[in-house]
Image (cartoon, helix red, strand yellow):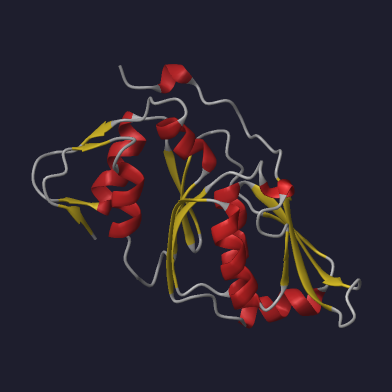
């Protein structure tokens, strides 16, 4: 997967966009996710920077450069490749209160291809709502979504269930799947809330000198 020509350094101005756009459809990894700890290294702490060897670099070269030169790590959580730091939980937190709805989501198709680069909940929520035919909470422009992390991931051919997992991991949110009994016609409801889990504090002494 070519990263692009004349790219000699990955930094806060180009890294996420370059890598998400370089990610192509394949049979092993369906989604490339920059988790909140990884994007914080670029946008909040301004300490993530990785040099690339000359010539045309690949996406694999970029992953290797980040993991060797920054606090960002790579973990394959099938079918996702997670770029994260030590603080990011690597398992999505999903509570199923209605097994039938969860089973339907596993058979539902999400959009064929999506790239979210630093996108907020107001962009993500309508796409989930349309693909899953469900009530997705919180609603757009809701105060309850203000604390969600912005989403940065690229995906190909996800199921509805995989889309929920990807959004939860990218936005550091938990998910509850249930049936909404408040409406006249009960329907599937998916509720996202902040995920307060922290695995560990990244060790600054692990940074290359």
The x and y percentages for residue 112 are 44, 76
Is any part of residue 50 visible from this angle?
yes
- Along the viewing direction, whichever of 185 and 38 lies nearer the viewer: 185
- Along the viewing direction, whichever of 143 and 181 lies nearer the viewer: 143
Q: Residue at x 33, y 50 (%)?
A: 17
Q: Which image quarter: residue 43?
A: top left
The x and y percentages for residue 89 are 61, 43
Residue 27 placement, left or right of 2: right
Is any part of residue 166 visible from this angle?
no
Up the image or down, 136 lies above or below 17; here it is below
Outermost residue to the left: 55
The x and y percentages for residue 168 are 62, 54
Q: Residue at x 34, y 35 (%)?
A: 12
Residue 161 placement, left or right of 114: right
Quadrant where the image shows the N terminus: bottom left
Q: Which image quarter: residue 105?
A: bottom right
- Along the viewing direction, whichever of 199 and 129 lies nearer the viewer: 129
The x and y percentages for residue 21 are 31, 58
């Amino acid at each position: 997967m070519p990263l692009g020509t004349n790219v000699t350094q990955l930094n806060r101005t180009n890294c996420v966009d370059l890598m998400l756009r370089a990610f192509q459809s394949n049979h092993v990894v369906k989604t490339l996710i920059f988790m909140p700890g990884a994007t914080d290294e670029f946008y909040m702490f301004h300490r993530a920077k990785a040099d690339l060897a000359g010539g045309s670099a690949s996406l694999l070269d970029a992953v290797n450069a980040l993991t060797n030169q920054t606090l960002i790590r790579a973990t394959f959580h099938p079918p996702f490749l997670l770029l994260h730091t030590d603080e990011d939980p690597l398992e999505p937190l999903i509570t199923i209160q209605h097994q039938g709805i969860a089973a339907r989501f596993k058979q539902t198709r999400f959009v064929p291809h999506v790239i979210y680069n630093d996108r907020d909940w107001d962009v993500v929520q309508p796409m989930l709502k349309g693909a899953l035919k469900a009530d997705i909470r919180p609603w757009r422009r809701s105060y309850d979504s203000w604390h969600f992390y912005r989403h940065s991931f690229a995906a190909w051919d996800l199921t509805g269930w995989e889309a929920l997992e990807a959004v939860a991991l990218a936005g550091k949110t938990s998910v509850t799947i249930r049936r909404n009994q408040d409406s006249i016609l009960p329907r599937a409801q998916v509720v996202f809330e902040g995920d307060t889990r922290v695995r560990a504090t990244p060790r600054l002494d692990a940074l290359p000198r």
